[in-house]
Amino acid sequence: MRTMTLTRMLRLVTGLMLLVLVGLPASAETLGVTTSRSDQAHAGRSGGTADHSKFEVLQKDFKSGPEVTAACLTCHTEASRQVMDSIHWTWKFEHGKTGQTLGKSRVMNSFCGNVAANEPRCTSCHAGYGWTKMSEGPPKAADRVDCMVCHDRSGTYSKLEDNAGHPPLSPLAPGSKTITGAMASLFDIAKAAQSVGLPGRENCGQCHFYGGGGDNVKHGDLSSALVAPTKAVDVHMAKEGLNFACSNCHVSRHHQWPGSRYDVQAKDEIGTGKPGERRDVATCESCHGIVPHKAVTLKATKLNDHVERVACQSCHIPSFARGGVATKTKWDLSTAGQLKDGKPFHVDDFIQSDGQRLHTYLSTKGTFEWGENVKPHYAWFDGQMRYTLADQKIDPSRTVELNSFKGSGNDPRSRIWPFKRMQGRQAYDTKLLNLVHNQVFGPETDTAFWTNFDYTKSIKAAMDYVGQPYSGEFGFVDTYMYWPITHMVAPKGDALACNECHGKAGRLAGVTGVYLPGAHPMSLADILGLLLLFATAGGVLVHTGLRFVTSRGGQRHD
Amino acid sequence: MTERVVRIYPLFERFWHWAQAALVLLLLFTGFGLRGLHGLLRFDVAVALHTTAAVLLIILWIFAIFWHLTTGTWRHYVPTTDGLFKVARFYAYGIFKGERHPYRKAYWRKHNPLQALSYLGLKLVLFPTIWLTGLAYLTYGAWDSRPGAPSVLEIVATVHVLTAYAIAAFIIIHVYLLTTGHSFAEHVRPMITGYDKVELTPAEEAYLEADEPGRIRSRP
């Protein structure tokens, strides 16, 4: 017995040692996998085979951004030409379906209004260096493309907030800020140049999370909360989950990306495409297919029927501005310019969920409202955005839609989409009846609004600058601006319950052209039906009553 | 002619009747919920119950149609004007005067003419309408991309709902009429036990006594 036990113990120990020996390299491998998983997913691409820190051309004492770009171009010969063909560079979009010329260089918005006349501030987010005059177009030289803003993986590169796209370089003016509003600091350009890689969320986010002058101000569904989100904030980008980089959905080809807000694919009927086929679209369906609810249940079948008419986003993004970063929901520019003792001031009356106080009034910008976990506005959307440009007539007696779209239940290309509907109040020409440009930025000028607080001067200066006729008289008009909501997709357990729409005063109460059971109790059919029931019940009561009155009705019929 | 207690509702017919009653009530309850008239059920639960009950009811109808055709019991529903006016007059007038119900159940006519006519309307008009509109609604996914589909769906849904209300009105009258004449319990009992008093011709009586003694109770 004892011998048996000893033999067994020996076997056990040998076995354990073997396990440890075999297991060690195995666990090291596992660790390796885990490490690579912490990188963001880029549609299956790993980031290549080169270690940029070993390239001699990058081991220089760079003095400016363009010097780095010139070095990049010695290998990536076509990169600048590709970028210069993209909307990231041109800020111009020829809309084939509506015939309008759009893009940041042209459109008006309900935030700071317009780019032209405010260049070095607005073009701080241009993917290049030194676009100082809108009308002249972006710079022409290949080395003016900013490679690092998208490709720096050291996390040190940024752009100054007011220097037409240049990074903070020596000598750095005290108090300088970057485009994210952080204090600017000098950085090691060579190190940034040597640590390039595929763009992460924080790269795209430097511009796209801070549009409109601050974190999440503009989009509502794009904020710094997406740098390292939890699953509840974004099920795809969650750091502990799928960890998608932006380009995992916005797949790039030759530095061009799908996912335009001007020409949105409101409904994707192709889905995943053929096996192995690459589809250059950023739609949900391109991964999830057009029959996305997989369970073989009645509920899944019914939900799949919804795909035809309801965008995935409508149910799966129950609210935007999630994750603790509020978005601006209203911006009234008409109140800007008030001063206290001749000095600009601010009121910080909105308290974000993290306790941070946000501006609700700024002498430079006017009055704001903010929202967190905002319920979207829903509407039929055919994907085609039409803009009210500065040269178009407006009707100031009504709320002007800065961008608008069509769509209806009878248009098979339309679906019901969620939007952030931004409320604005901004300047227009009261004689010529068009929106006006405004110069807000220009610290050295005596016209810029943020310095001089005088719309009379700032509008005139901007209109002269863009060369558009201006009567000299301005007023303020209410505006709406629509931002399709498509990020911050929630885990499926957080998707909207049916009764959010199929219920009284539901989310789609304002949407017509769709039969929505439960949303409109007491419709005509119900009123007629209930009248029939009441009439029947009434008839029965009268009949019963008569039988009692005649007190013989209870007599047997046999 | 003699009056005898005969099993006029065979087991299947009783099962059909009560299963249909339960399913129709469940359909009405869930249907009202889906229309937003009450909030006692979650919408997805109401959809699941409504659809399941509808599918079960359709299966039951398929069996019932087969049963009517193969057993010849469809003949109970052939409309007749014979005695129709008398029955109508009874409910509108005679009942208040304490008159006797003018109709006697017969072996091949277990419903009075008015009753048979209303059941026929239910079976040929209301049930097929709600069945077809319901199936069209349920399979919307198969035709939703056709031009004008949303408007057609709304019409389909409206017809479905109006038919449902008509069926609900039928149920109110159907239940109320159980209180006329016999006591309520006496009216309901035949649909539970299957047996009721029926006028038999001597030939029918002789046939039942001889060939189907289980269907006819011995004289008291």
Image (cartoon, coloured by chain):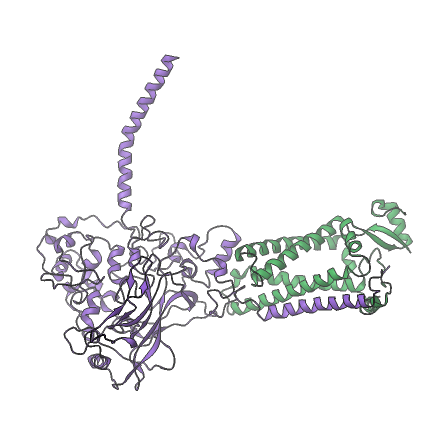
Chain colours: A purple, B green
Residue drawn at x 43%, y 70% is: A407
Q: Residue furthest front?
A: A341
| Residue A527: percent from left, percent from top | 61, 70
User: A471 or B76: nearer the eye?
Assistant: A471
Quarter of the figure with residue B34: bottom right
| Residue A179: percent from left, percent from top | 21, 63
Quarter of the figure with residue A311: bottom left
| Residue A239: percent from left, percent from top | 31, 50
B90 left or right of A390 in image: right
A463 w.r.t. B108: above or below: below
Q: Is residue A86 visible?
A: no
A80 left or right of B160 in image: left
Residue drawn at x 56%, y 56% is: B41
A23 w.r.t. A183: above or below: above
| Residue A376: percent from left, percent from top | 40, 64
User: A504 or B13: nearer the eye?
Assistant: A504
Q: Is residue A377 visible?
A: yes
Residue drawn at x 31%, y 54% is: A248
Locate the N terminus of chain B and report the quarter of the image it occupies: bottom right
A236 left or right of A471 in image: right
Residue drawn at x 84%, y 46% is: B212
Q: How many marks?
A: 0
